[in-house]
Image (cartoon, grey):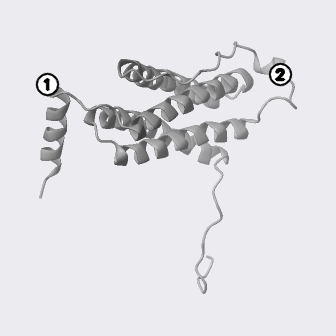
C-alpha cells in the first residue's frame, strides 16, 4: 500500500520529469476554462462589494477575495495560454465609487454581498474538487490543488465572519422521524 510520502514523491517527480506531457483532455480544458470564468465573474462581484458597502470587515474580505482571485486567474490564464487554449471573454473592471453615492434601492445589502461572495468561493471549491478527480496531468492537478487550497484558506475565516453577522444561509436541519428536537 502506498503511503502519503510516496504519493507526494511520485507527484513531485512527475512535475519535474523531462517526459513529454500528453495534450490536455477535454475535461481538463473545460474545468480550467470554467474556473477562470468563475474567478473573472467573482472579481466583478468583489469590486461591486468594495463600491457599495461601508462595512469595514466586509470590505476587507472583498479586498482579500479580489486579490486572491486576480492571482489565481493569472496562474490559470498563463497556463491556458501556454497550452494554446482560447481564453473566456472577461468583463471590464468596475470603476471605483463611493458607497454613499449609490441609492439604497439599487445596491446589494451586506448580507446579499456576503452570500454572493460565498457562492463564488463554494462554486470554485466544488469545481476544483470535481476536476481534480478527473484530471490526468499532474501539472493540471497541482494547479487545481493550489487554487483549492487558496480558496479554503480564504473561505474558512470568511465563513466565520458570516456566522458572526448572521449572514450565513443554511438549509433547514434534518431530524429523522421520531428524533427529539432539543
Tell me if 155 is positioned left or right of 91 in this view: left
Mark 1: which secondary structure?
Answer: loop
The mark found on residue 18 in the picture is: 1
Q: Residue at x 40, y 33 (%)?
A: 147
> Which of the 4 image quarters holds residue 178?
bottom right
- Which image quarter is the N terminus in? bottom left
Question: Tag 1: Cα neighbours inside 10 Å, few (<14), some, or many (≥20)?
Answer: few
Q: Residue at x 66, y 44 (%)?
A: 165
Question: Tag 2: Cα neighbours inside 10 Å, few (<14), some, or many (≥20)?
Answer: some
Placement of 108 over or under 181, stated as above or below: above
The mark found on residue 91 in the picture is: none
Position of residue 155 measured from the top left corner of the image (x, y, whole percent): 50, 39
Q: Are marks 1 and 2 in contact (CB under 8 Å)?
A: no
Mark 1 vs 2, N-terminal side: 1
Mark 2: which secondary structure?
Answer: loop
Position of residue 152 measured from the top left corner of the image (x, y, whole percent): 44, 40
Q: Residue at x 67, y 48 (%)?
A: 166
The residue labelled by disc 2 is 102
Position of residue 151 measured from the top left corner of the image (x, y, whole percent): 45, 36
In front here: 107 or 160?
107
Tell me if 28 is positioned left or right of 20 in this view: right
> Which of the 4 image quarters holds residue 83?
top left
Placement of 35 over or under 100, stated as above or below: below
In front here: 149 or 15?
15
> Which of the 4 image quarters holds residue 106?
top right
In front here: 107 or 58?
107
Q: CA distance from mark 1 to mark 2?
A: 56 Å
Position of residue 64 measured from the top left corner of the image (x, y, whole percent): 52, 26
Q: Residue at x 13, y 54 (%)?
A: 2
Amino acid at each position: 500500500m502506498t503511503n502519503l510520502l510516496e504519493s507526494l514523491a511520485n507527484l513531485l517527480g512527475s512535475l519535474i520529469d523531462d517526459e513529454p506531457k500528453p495534450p490536455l483532455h477535454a475535461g481538463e480544458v473545460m474545468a480550467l476554462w470554467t474556473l477562470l470564468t468563475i474567478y473573472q465573474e467573482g472579481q466583478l462581484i468583489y469590486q461591486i462589494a468594495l463600491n457599495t458597502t461601508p462595512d469595514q470587515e466586509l470590505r476587507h474580505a472583498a479586498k482579500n477575495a479580489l486579490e486572491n482571485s486576480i492571482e489565481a486567474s493569472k496562474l490559470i490564464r498563463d497556463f491556458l495560454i501556454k497550452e494554446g487554449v482560447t481564453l473566456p471573454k472577461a468583463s471590464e473592471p468596475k470603476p471605483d465609487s463611493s458607497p454613499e453615492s449609490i441609492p439604497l434601492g439599487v445596491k446589494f445589502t451586506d448580507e446579499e454581498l456576503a452570500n454572493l461572495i460565498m457562492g463564488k468561493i463554494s462554486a470554485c471549491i466544488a469545481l476544483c474538487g470535481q476536476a481534480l478527480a478527473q484530471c490526468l496531468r499532474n501539472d493540471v492537478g497541482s494547479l487545481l490543488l493550489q487554487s483549492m487550497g487558496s480558496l479554503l484558506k480564504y473561505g474558512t475565516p470568511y465563513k466565520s465572519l458570516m456566522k458572526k453577522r448572521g449572514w450565513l444561509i443554511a438549509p433547514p436541519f434534518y431530524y429523522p422521524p421520531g428524533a427529539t428536537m432539543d
